[in-house]
Image (cartoon, rainbow, N blue to C red):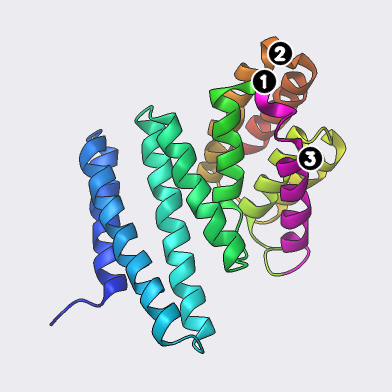
């Protein structure tokens, strides 16, 4: 039986995950890029031939956005920061174009640009404030029960100089069923940002440090 495109893309993504876990980043990147090409071609075909199938297009857009986010993560682990930024940029454009209830690529695009150069914080202020407004609208609606949405909101609120709102978002993160592994995933983003901002933005670094200690305590990590 012939695989349908989404099944092929899923199989390639699973292979990419295994390669990435073993440290074979070139192989992981190639598999993930193949999955992206398949989903992009299928989405383009649907746009041309079946414009009335909005729900089906949205499903493929979600899959494509997810695959681009995964590619960005592989590039990041491989130390290929500019390539990771570009993957997340493409992913956030899919999120925007199809008005997806997601913020993974957008948030990681901001994070990776700041990890590359924390001096960009002022330059990215407009993008950060837009992200706050976007994610706040999502958590007030369809994403209210998603721990990762509240974590994204807490992060961009910190970056936007809104520590009180950040604390409130992380409290909601705790209340939405985040597991210990989820705490560690969030801390893996906050810790390098804190370190990057210590020389140039010590107040922000201190606020991130407060959040890190609170999340560590809540997760049971000493």
Residue 77 coordinates in the image, percent (x, y): 38, 32
Mark 3: few/some/many CA within 10 Å (<14, 14-19, 20+): many
- The CA span between labels 3 and 2 is 20 Å
Determine if residue 187 is in view: no
Residue 39 coordinates in the image, percent (x, y): 35, 66
Instruction: Return the residue at label 2.
Output: 200
- The CA span between labels 3 and 1 is 21 Å
Determine if residue 163 is in view: yes
Instruction: Return the residue at label 3.
Output: 166
- Give the quarter of the image for residue 210: top right
List the single residue furthest toward the front: 48
Instruction: Return the residue at label 1.
Output: 119
List the single residue furthest toward the top: 199
List the single residue furthest toward the right: 164
- Residue 101 lies in magenta, yes or no? no
Residue 189 coordinates in the image, percent (x, y): 56, 33
Q: Secondary structure at mark 3?
A: helix
61 shown above or below 83: below
Residue 90 coordinates in the image, percent (x, y): 49, 51
- The CA span between labels 1 and 2 is 7 Å
Residue name at image x 67 percent, y 20 percent: 119
């Amino acid at each position: 039986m012939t695989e349908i495109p989404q099944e092929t893309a899923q199989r390639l993504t699973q292979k990419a995950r295994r390669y990435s876990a073993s440290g074979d980043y070139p192989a992981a990147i190639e598999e993930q890029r193949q999955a992206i090409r398949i989903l992009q071609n299928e989405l383009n075909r649907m746009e041309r031939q079946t414009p009335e199938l909005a729900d089906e297009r949205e499903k493929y857009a979600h899959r494509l956005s997810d695959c681009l986010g995964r590619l960005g993560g592989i590039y990041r682990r491989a130390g290929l920061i500019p390539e990771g930024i570009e993957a997340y940029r493409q992913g956030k454009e899919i999120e925007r174009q199809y008005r997806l209830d997601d913020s993974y690529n957008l948030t990681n695009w901001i994070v990776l640009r700041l990890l590359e150069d924390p001096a960009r914080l002022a330059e990215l202020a407009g993008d950060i404030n837009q992200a706050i407004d976007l994610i706040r609208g999502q958590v007030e609606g369809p994403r209210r029960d998603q721990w990762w949405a509240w974590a994204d909101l807490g992060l961009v609120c910190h970056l936007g100089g809104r520590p009180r709102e950040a604390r409130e978002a992380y409290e909601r993160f705790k209340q939405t069923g985040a597991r210990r592994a989820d705490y560690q995933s969030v801390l893996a983003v906050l810790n390098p940002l804190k370190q990057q901002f210590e020389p140039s933005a010590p107040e922000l670094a201190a606020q991130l440090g407060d959040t890190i200690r609170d999340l560590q305590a809540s997760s049971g990590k000493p």
